[in-house]
Image (cartoon, helix red, strand yellow):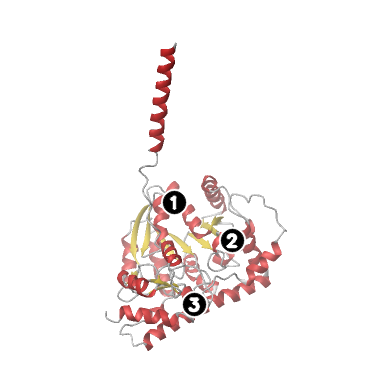
Amino acid sequence: MAMRSLISERVSCRSSVLGARWMSSWWRNVEPAPKDPILGVTEAFLADPSPDKVNVGVGAYRDDNGKPVVLECVREAERRIAGTANMEYLPMGGSVKMVEETLKLAYGDNSEFIKDKRIAAVQSLSGTGACRLFADFQKRFHPDSQIYIPVPTWSNHHNIWRDAHVTQRTFHYYHPGTKGLDFAALMDDIKNAPNGSFFLLHACAHNPTGVDPSEEQWKEISYQIKAKGHFPFFDMAYQGFASGDPERDAKAIRIFLKDGHLLGLAQSYAKNMGLYGQRVGCLSVLCEDEKQAVAVKSQLQQLARPMYSNPPVHGALIVSTILGDAELKKLWLKEVQGMADRIIGMRTALRENLEELGSPLSWKHITNQIGMFCYSGLTPEQVDRLTNEYHIYMTRNGRISMAGVTTGNVGFLANAVHEVTKST
């Protein structure tokens, strides 16, 4: 009996040791993930003890003192909804009221597509969530399709379609020589793509370049995409934030609608209402008829169910309260115009400062571009010098967030940029 007990004890001990070894090896092959190229800039900025440091990498609006802004219309909406709503789950498709108001912004107050119930739409986790939902939808119902993404684009676009296992291709967009749109190459890429491809388009204020097609160019792009039977998917993260006028910034969408496209659209309230942390957005898909829209919406909801089940309520209440009230909507339009005007003003100031310093380079592209970001043309090595010598932080592709430029730092920024570029 003693011998059996000893053997049993040894077996048990051996099993425990083997089990411990097995469990300790579960995550041994996990390597640290590479830092996000955008969020990593903020981490480095925060770790810098210099009192003169400047962050022009963050994609969030700042006032002229470099401080985060909460819009007055948002504060008033919060006061109105405080204590008036319960904390129950929203439906999988989100707030019906918020979605209705959001569709009006993109498709028009009197849109025939809204009236005919041809749009399948769900509340999403801001624009990122809308893109991811659509990428999964694309993969599920067009598993052999591919998505054409502009060069360059917001870096997370590649992550989204990659993790949805959608094959990615690229198309020309930015021309480094002119610091503008490479329109001829763009059109060639649309023509040469296999019929029925998906194309990712920035509706306005292209991120990161700030370069948008003209109205006539949008019309030609629309014509060629339709001729090839491609599906256009728009990411509209900056409606109202580009020009200050939400109607003007939806021009590309309206052109495609007029030309008879079926399309997909991601919308976000992070920038134009300053609701960054509330993660409020919308994904919509224009369908052939109401029956198809019902089917598509049901599938979008089914995709959302295992991903996050249903979206959060507070931000959606803020949006629907603002857009559903004439007084608050008027205030929002005034405030979004003010934000856009400040950024446009900082573009002018930065260019003028560089020109006054006698820079040998042309900086016209600073004011020709639009929206939150300026694609400066700075090289990665020049960006490194700005960080190491002047404590100025931006992404290594030279993208400057104009929201981080203020009357207090624009001269310092211009002088630093001049110093690292004057010998080129």
- Tell me the SS state at disc 3: helix
In the picture, the disc for residue 343 is 3
Identify the mark at residue 114; answer none if there is no mark: 2
Instruction: Quote the CA–CA distance across marks 2 and 1.
Output: 23 Å
Disc 3 marks which amino acid?
Answer: Ile
Residue with the most extreme top position? 1
Label 1 vs label 3, nearer the camera: 3
Give the camera-side residue of 57 and 115. Answer: 57
Residue at (31, 82) in percent of width and height: 361
Q: What x and y, as percent, mark residue 378? A: 33, 74
Which image quadrant is residue 114 in? bottom right
- Of the residues under marks 3 and 2, which one precedes in the sequence? 2
Q: Is residue 363 above or below residue 137?
A: below
Residue that mark 1 sits on: 138
- The one nearer the camera, 302 or 214, is 302
Mark 2 and mark 1 in contact? Answer it, CB < 8 Å: no
Helix, strand, or loop for circle 1?
helix
Furthest residue to the left?
424
CA separation in Å, label 1 and label 3 = 36 Å
Locate residue 1, reporting x and y percent. Answer: 44, 11
Label 2: how many Cα within 10 Å (few below 14, some 14–19, many 20+)? some
Disc number lying in front (3 or 2): 3
In the image, 231 versus 45, the foreground residue is 45
Badge 1 or badge 3: first in the primary sequence = 1
